[in-house]
Image (cartoon, grey):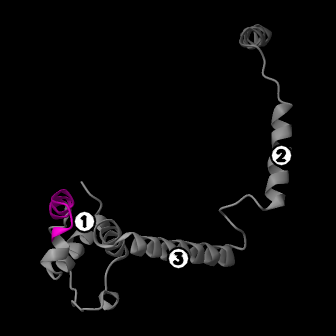
Amino acid sequence: MMNNELSEACSEVLIILNNTSREDVKKIPDKFLKFLVENKSTEYIPNLVINPDINKVNLKPKSKALLGLIYKKYWCNSKEANEFDIILHNNQVREEEKKIQKYGIDVFSNTNSDNTIKFESSKQELSNIKEENYLKRIFNWLKSIFKNE
């Protein structure tokens, strides 16, 4: 069973593809189209106002991701694919910068020296702990039982 968001996204993508030229839809493999049809939501009815400018259509984020995948893999040439990759990379960098500003540290790197020092000191503390031999533990346990009696 697909998760709800993805099944709703499949429904939205199918509506977009129904309003796309047949030549473009024929470029998409039947196996992928079958995946969309089999996994679309049976309960969700997308309320999309189809607009020639796809950016003005109110799509869910997963629908946009699926359409991006279709565009990159089946509709664009190598030059357009490279430009698309650059756009995706720039978007990811922007999102990471927003997270850095929001949380105050770069959560994707180990540049915070305080964390490194704490990790190293806790590592040293753990190395000082010596584990007893299991036979010695059994012997000590037996000794404690006889001491209590």
- Specify the quadrant of the image occupied by residue 29: bottom left
What is the three-letter code of the residue carrying label 3?
A: Asn
Image quadrant containing the C terminus = top right
Residue 87, position in %: x, y? 49, 77
Q: Earlier in the sequence, mark 3 or mark 1?
A: 1
In space, the residues marked 3 and 1 are separated at their CA atoms by: 25 Å
What is the three-letter code of the residue carrying label 1?
A: Ser
- Specify the quadrant of the image occupied by residue 110: bottom right
Residue 93, position in %: x, y? 59, 73
Residue 113 seen by the camera? yes
Residue 37, position in %: x, y? 15, 64
In space, the residues marked 2 and 1 are separated at their CA atoms by: 46 Å
Q: Residue at x 76, y 13 (%)?
A: 133
Q: Earlier in the sequence, mark 2 or mark 3?
A: 3
Tell me the number on the disc at residue 91.
3
Q: Residue at x 67, y 73 (%)?
A: 100
Position above or below: 145 against 24: above
Q: Residue at x 44, y 74 (%)?
A: 84
- Specify the quadrant of the image occupied by residue 40: bottom left
Front residue of this view, candidates 90 and 15 = 90
Tell me the number on the disc at residue 7.
1
Tell me the number on the disc at residue 120.
2
What is the chief secondary structure element of the magenta stretch?
helix
Q: Residue at x 65, y 77 (%)?
A: 102
The residue segment tinted magenta is 26-38
